[in-house]
Image: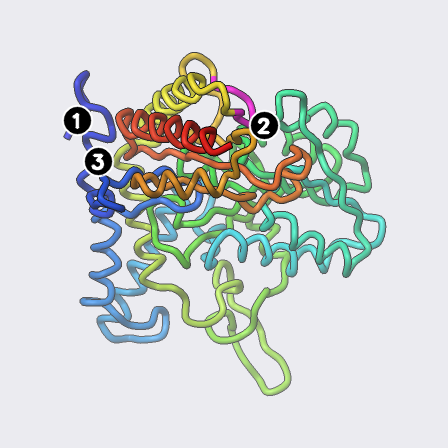
């Protein structure tokens, strides 16, 4: 169904997401926890069911028809992901369980074999734990030094400090594309260009970018990029690592076992070509196929349309939150068109715990996130134990935001009455 002046993108796609059509605590569900995980459209659910009902078989290992069909669908999904992020080759896409596993793959395969005492790893203080803990482990094992880019006064990535921080000792820069707490969109192309001028490799955590922005790994020129399927309308248990061919070829296997081998002898083995060298054992076949279906679904809508509509929602969300004086939002503000940041708002209310707000909103059928959002160091810098977070996707509506704003105002009034 095409968009018209009277129809929003959500009007067109809403019926594709059956989970949204339910009552929670007697109220219509308002799902605003999309930065944690997205909902799944019927096309993705059907692709998963079709695999298990029609094609259930192991991939790459059988000459029979079911195995051939499963392999074609599984490898076809890899082609779709490669096109979606504009990889130069399908062999640059490695399936993983999630982005966390993808980062660990790079940390253990490349990091432990290329970093030495005194080498520098540059991260930012806004990193998700998944792009922090693996590098802490690698630094402890190798003697590498962790350095951190701080925030500007506007609570964004401090590019000028990054320029002063990087040195010839820097071997890796690993940064988030879009912060899941601050919502800022980091200048990853410029960060990569600067890092490469010092001879450093670059890893981009794109979990909050790939579902919402046109992502072009060749334009960014990063060495690795990671994403999780469950944040982009695919099932849980599937994600991917993008890596440049020459970089991936230089890396030893991460896990050993079936699938990742060429020949096995009693005393040694040789390894399969990319990308299978990094895909040991029976993979999440149905989930990978469904990831391909999710890519098809997003592509058919158009990432440009998704981004434009989310900008409208962002403007509406921030305008609504601005009417509640007790609310403090973290991260940069969007411009008048809702552009310049992600479609999410992490916020706090003085003297009211974020979990209490979330619980009261859940009573009204409104799902938001509360806590540190896997960014404990960032929250300590902000002087907070946690924040509440409302995060949007293209199936959300302006009316849902209005319901959330009213319920949030009522919840604050309720707690203030108890103080």
Closer to the chain start, of discs 2 and 3, is 3
The residue that label 2 is drawn on is 187
**Front label number (3 vs 1):** 3
Q: Is residue 329 magenta?
A: yes
**Label of residue 2 in the image:** 1
Q: Residues within 10 Å of mark 1 (few under 14, many from 20)?
A: few
Q: Position of residue 380 (x, y in %)?
A: 67, 39
Q: Quadrant of residue 332?
A: top right
Q: In the rendered structure, are the residues bearing label 3 and label 1 in contact, judged by CB atoms less than 8 Å apart? A: no
Question: What is the C-alpha distance between the residues marked 2 and 1?
Answer: 33 Å
Q: Quadrant of residue 158?
A: top right
Under tag 2, what secondary structure?
A: loop
The residue that label 3 is drawn on is 13
How many numbered marks appear? 3
State left or right for residue 327 relative to residue 172. left
Q: Is residue 218 magenta?
A: no
- Residue found at the very far bottom of the displayed protein: 266
* Residue 84 versus residue 254 in the image, above or below: above
Please state, as top left, top right, bottom left or bottom right, where the N terminus lies in the image: top left
């Amino acid at each position: 169904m095409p968009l018209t002046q009277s129809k929003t993108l959500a009007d067109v796609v809403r019926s594709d997401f059956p989970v949204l059509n339910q009552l929670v605590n007697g109220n219509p569900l308002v799902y605003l926890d999309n930065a944690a995980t997205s909902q799944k459209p019927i096309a993705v659910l059907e692709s998963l069911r079709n695999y298990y009902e029609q094609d259930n078989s192991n991939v790459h290992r059988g000459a029979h028809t079911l195995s051939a069909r499963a392999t074609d669908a599984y490898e076809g999904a890899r082609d779709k992901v490669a096109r979606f992020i504009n990889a130069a080759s399908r062999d640059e896409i490695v399936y993983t369980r999630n982005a966390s596993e993808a980062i660990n793959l790079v940390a253990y395969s490349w990091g432990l074999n290329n970093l030495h005492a005194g080498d520098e790893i540059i991260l930012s203080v806004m990193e998700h734990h998944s792009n922090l803990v693996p590098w802490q482990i690698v630094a402890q094992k190798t003697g590498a030094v962790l350095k951190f880019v701080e925030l500007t006064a506007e609570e964004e990535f401090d590019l000028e400090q990054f320029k002063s921080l990087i040195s010839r000792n820097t071997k890796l820069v690993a940064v988030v594309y879009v912060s899941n707490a601050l919502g800022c969109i980091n200048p990853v192309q410029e960060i990569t260009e600067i890092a490469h001028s010092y001879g450093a490799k670059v890893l981009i955590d794109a979990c909050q970018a790939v579902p919402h922005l046109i992502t072009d790994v060749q334009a960014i020129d990063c060495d690795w990029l990671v994403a999780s399927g469950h944040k982009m309308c695919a099932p849980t248990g599937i994600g991917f690592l993008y890596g440049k061919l020459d970089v991936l070829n230089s890396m030893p296997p991460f896990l050993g076992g079936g699938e990742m081998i060429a020949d096995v002898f009693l005393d040694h083995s040789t390894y399969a070509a990319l990308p299978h060298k990094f895909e040991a054992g029976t993979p999440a076949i149905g989930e990978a196929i469904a990831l391909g279906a999710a890519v098809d679904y997003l592509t058919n809508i158009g990432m440009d349309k998704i981004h434009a509509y989310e900008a409208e929602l962002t403007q509406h969300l921030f305008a609504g939150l601005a009417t509640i004086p007790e609310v403090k939002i973290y991260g940069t503000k969007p411009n008048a068109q809702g552009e310049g940041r992600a479609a999410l708002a992490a916020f706090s209310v003085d003297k009211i715990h974020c979990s209490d707000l979330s619980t009261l909103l859940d009573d009204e059928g409104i799902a938001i996130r509360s806590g540190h959002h896997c960014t404990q160091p960032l929250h300590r810098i902000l002087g907070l134990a946690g924040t509440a977070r409302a995060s949007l996707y293209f199936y959300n509506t302006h009316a849902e935001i209005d319901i959330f704003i009213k319920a949030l105002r009522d919840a604050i009034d309720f707690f203030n009455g108890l103080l």
